[in-house]
């Protein structure tokens, strides 16, 4: 592993080098909420000044750049009695992500396991993921963040470089030769012992700021034991079954496919759209039978996928603890509270 | 019914071109306007169906139709008779828009006494008016197309599906599903009320896309959690009147609204 430090002014130069030839996605402020707090999103950025390096959490994850909410899997052109299929992976050039937090990098690593690592990789995802360049950025834990409980508060891989603000300097961890070559464009230095000490101090201070925790000890077993627990029904009564939690989740990848025909009958489309296991017809099958007609059973299965099924398959949770679902849920359903209640620890 | 020559084929298969008639009862006729107001695809639309009756668009009239697209609510006795006649003639009767599906904005008068309503609107020259009813209160409705107004893309998709014989399926989920996919800022975050969490999707979150909270014109989604919605509105500082105003506006939530009013 290679480390470097550089003056804070240099970051703008690095950005300008990158943006001159690439599509750069970064955190920006898109508005203010009713309490005048900034609302952040990952948007394409052209100017360094619009990048909010101090952003907390974006409302929506970056997944729309590699798992769009809606995308055409194929388009068809239809003649009198013949047809042709065209497949487009819907990406013209790789993105640079300028400032992803560790949770969102870990989310990508988890998605890779499912969408790239399986027997049938998803080409639409792979095409967007290929050559994606990621700059990680350290963050300040927010009251809703529980990434540390999910082991997603630091990223071990899945980025090209990771930048940590250590006061007067940026401390950067380099994982790829592309990143190394990019950094040749700015003035960097080998970190000295003082920089290491400063880095460790920053990390240790960050760790003290986590206020929300989830006890994952034996969670797969406990979820099995409490499958019939009444707490699921209580959460189900609160649930709006609106699918917001899945939409704002950086790792929810379930989808539906729809085929439509253009009104001129000369074209057709096969469209994929991200769905949610909380929506009423998620488990409805041909013939009309619905395996999960009740809200609580659908809500429960979302937790079982994240915290049990995925753990058994990959030895890690599918939840990164970013807290977006709890923040976005109008009914106030949060992962830490749901898990605590299943564990019989609800206050 | 006669068998019109198919004008279109799909993958070499000739398509049946149904005879379609448009009708309106008490309404603004805006839903029909939506269909006409789609110049780019209007000719394609007309090639899939043979329109034989469409007062807003053409002079010719025929009573020989298979599909009746009916806009508006029923608010007078003569309308009831006319609707029943349409039902007798049509193989398929489609309720077009919120008025036809739920009574629409017109049904707002239902919570007042008819005498007061007549006096308020017509003063000393009252005319006959009844409580507003959706079409299905009087005749069997085969298909509902929701919205105030209906969304033209949705109507087109339905017509395409009818032409090629594909099932018509409405979204069962609420607007939030589409609103999040459109990457909108949640209106509750902006301090605005919105019925998106309980209203049926399919409009592609039309109003929230313009930062205008949902008023529920498409009626309830399936498995709507109205109790939670009430709590959320309260927590966000909106009065019971605010939620009632929205629930009552188009009639799709009338049973919930009536219950709320009783309390």
Image (cartoon, rainbow, N blue to C red):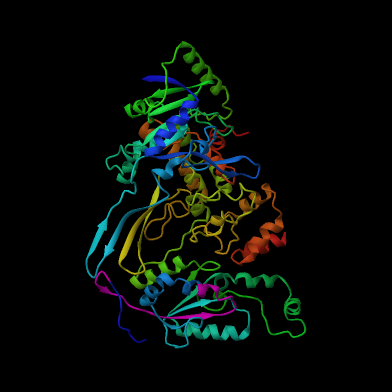
Taking A205 as reference, is B8 left or right? left
Which quadrant is the N terminus of chain A positioned in?
top left
Q: Is residue A317 visible?
A: no
Residue nearest the observer in this picture, A52 or B152:
A52
x and y percent of residue A261 in the render? 34, 64
- Farthest residue toward the top? A193
In this rendering, the count of numbered labels is 0
x and y percent of residue A112 in the render? 35, 37
- Farthest residue toward the left? A82
On whether residue B234 falls in the magenta region, the answer is no
* Up/down of A173 relative to A95, above or below: above
Residue nearest the observer in this picture, B241 or A82:
A82
Taking B261 as reference, is B220 left or right? left
x and y percent of residue A308 in the render? 43, 36
* Up/down of B35 relative to A107, above or below: below
Q: Residue at x 56, y 86 (%)?
A: B81
Q: Residue at x 40, y 35 (%)?
A: A18
x and y percent of residue B138 in the render? 56, 78
Taking A337 as reference, is A93 left or right? left
Q: Is residue B182 visible?
A: yes
Q: Which residues are magenta?
A: B10-33
Which quadrant is the C terminus of chain A positioned in?
top right
On whether residue B30 falls in the magenta region, the answer is yes
* Up/down of A38 relative to B162, above or below: above
Residue nearest the observer in this picture, A340 or B233:
B233
Which of the 4 image quarters holds residue B128? bottom right
Which of the 4 image quarters holds residue B115? bottom right
């Amino acid at each position: 592993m290679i480390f470097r430090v550089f003056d804070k002014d240099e970051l703008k130069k690095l950005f300008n080098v990158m943006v001159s030839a690439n599509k750069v996605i970064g955190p920006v402020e898109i508005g203010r909420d009713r309490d005048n707090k900034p609302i952040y999103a990952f948007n394409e950025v052209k100017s360094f000044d619009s990048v909010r390096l101090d952003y907390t959490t974006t409302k929506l994850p970056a997944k729309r750049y590699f798992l769009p909410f809606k995308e055409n899997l194929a388009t068809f052109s239809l003649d009198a009695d013949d047809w042709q299929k065209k497949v487009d992976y819907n990406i013209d050039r790789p993105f640079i992500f300028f400032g992803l937090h560790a949770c969102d990098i870990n989310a990508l690593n988890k998605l890779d396991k499912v969408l790239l690592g399986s027997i049938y990789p998803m080409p639409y995802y792979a095409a967007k993921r290929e050559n994606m360049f990621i700059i990680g950025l350290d963050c300040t834990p927010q009251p809703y963040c529980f990434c540390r409980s999910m082991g997603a508060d630091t990223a071990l891989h899945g980025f090209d470089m990771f930048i940590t603000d250590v006061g007067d300097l940026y401390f950067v961890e380099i994982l790829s030769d592309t990143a190394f070559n990019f950094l040749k464009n700015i003035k960097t230095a080998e970190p000295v012992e003082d920089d290491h000490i400063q880095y460790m101090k920053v990390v240790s201070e960050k760790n003290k700021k986590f206020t929300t925790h989830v006890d994952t000890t034996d969670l797969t077993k406990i979820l099995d034991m409490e499958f019939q627990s009444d707490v699921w029904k209580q959460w189900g009564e609160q649930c709006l079954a609106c699918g917001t939690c899945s939409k704002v989740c950086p790792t929810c990848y379930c989808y539906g496919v729809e085929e439509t025909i253009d009104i001129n009958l000369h074209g057709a489309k096969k469209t994929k759209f991200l769905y949610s296991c909380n929506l009423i017809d998620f488990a409805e099958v041909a013939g009309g039978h619905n395996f999960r007609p009740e809200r609580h059973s659908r809500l429960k299965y979302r937790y079982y996928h994240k915290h049990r099924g995925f753990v058994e398959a990959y030895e890690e949770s599918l939840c990164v603890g970013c807290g977006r679902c709890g923040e976005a849920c109008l009914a106030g359903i949060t992962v830490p509270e749901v898990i605590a209640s299943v564990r019989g620890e609800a206050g | 019914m006669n068998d019109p020559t198919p004008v279109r084929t799909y993958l070499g298969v000739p398509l049946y071109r149904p005879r379609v008639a448009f009708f309106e009862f008490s309404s603004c006729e805006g839903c029909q306007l939506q269909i006409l107001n789609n110049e780019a695809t209007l000719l394609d639309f007309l090639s899939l169906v043979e329109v034989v009756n469409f007062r807003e668009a053409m002079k010719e009239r025929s009573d020989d139709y298979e599909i009746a697209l009916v806009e508006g609510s029923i608010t007078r006795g003569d309308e009831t008779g006319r609707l029943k006649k349409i039902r007798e003639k049509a193989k398929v009767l489609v309720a077009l828009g919120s008025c036809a599906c739920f009574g629409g904005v017109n049904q707002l008068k239902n919570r007042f006494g008819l005498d007061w309503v007549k006096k308020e609107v017509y003063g000393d020259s009252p005319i006959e008016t009844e409580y507003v009813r959706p079409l299905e209160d009087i005749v069997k409705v085969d298909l509902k197309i929701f919205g105030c107004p209906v969304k033209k893309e949705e109507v087109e998709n339905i017509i395409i599906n009818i032409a090629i014989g594909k099932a018509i399926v409405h979204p069962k989920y609420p607007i939030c599903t589409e609103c999040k996919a459109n990457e909108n800022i949640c209106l509750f975050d902006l301090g605005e009320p919105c019925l998106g969490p309980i209203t049926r999707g399919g409009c592609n979150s039309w109003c929230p896309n313009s930062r205008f909270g949902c008023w529920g014109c498409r009626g309830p989604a399936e498995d709507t959690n109205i109790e939670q919605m009430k709590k959320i509105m309260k927590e966000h500082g909106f009065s019971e009147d605010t939620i009632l105003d929205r629930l009552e506006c188009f009639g799709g939530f009338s049973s919930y609204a009536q219950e709320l009013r009783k309390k």
